[in-house]
Image (tube, rainbow, N blue to C red):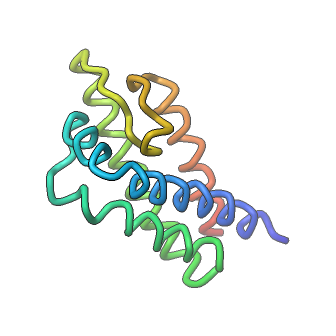
Amino acid sequence: MTVAVVASVLLGLAFLVAGGSKLAAGRAWPAEARGLGAPAWVTPVLPWAEIVVGAALITQIARRPAAVVAACLLVAFTALIAVRLAQGRRPPCACFGAWSTKPIGVSDIARNIALLVLAGLSMI
């Protein structure tokens, strides 16, 4: 397996877990997403988008475009977290549904940077 394939499978798994856990959280996730500052129109769409991107990365169907979409999403997520931290706000991340109920912190930014590295490797 090449580095790009391994990276894309790992990134795809993270996106599948993120999307699936948001759906499993039911009504709790949209409320937490709004608390983080996500636009209301994002909450019903994002879990499904994450699942589609994750599946494309794992199956290697359009790996590079899926990695680009994943990177764009990760940049947006990271920017939102950074803005909230700069404002002194620490709502729950809700990045992985009920599995991420602790307040956001620098570790969330570090995790996203690691995922961005995987996205970059998936593009080679």
What is the tally of numbered marks visible in this picture? 0
Which residue: 46% across, 23% down? 106
Which of the pair 52/63 is nearer the observer?
A: 52
The quarter in which the C terminus is drawn is bottom right
Q: Position of residue 50 (x, y in %)?
A: 44, 63
Q: Is residue 124 left or right of residue 20?
A: right
Residue 116 vs residue 77, the one in the foreground: 77
Image side of residue 11 versus residue 102, left or right = right
Query: Measured from the top left, where is residue 92 in percent x and y?
Result: 35, 29
Residue at x-position 33% and y-position 49%: 76
Q: Identify the residue at the far top of this view.
A: 88
Looking at the image, which residue sits at the far right? 1
**x, y percentage for residue 63?**
58, 76
Q: Is residue 71 above or below residue 76?
A: below
**Residue drawn where x is 65% and y is 65% of the image:** 8
The answer to which of 105 and 22 lies nearer the viewer is 22
Residue 48 % position (x, y): 38, 68
Q: Is residue 11 above or below residue 112?
A: below
Q: Quadrant of the N terminus?
A: bottom right
User: Image check: 15 left or right of 8?
Assistant: left
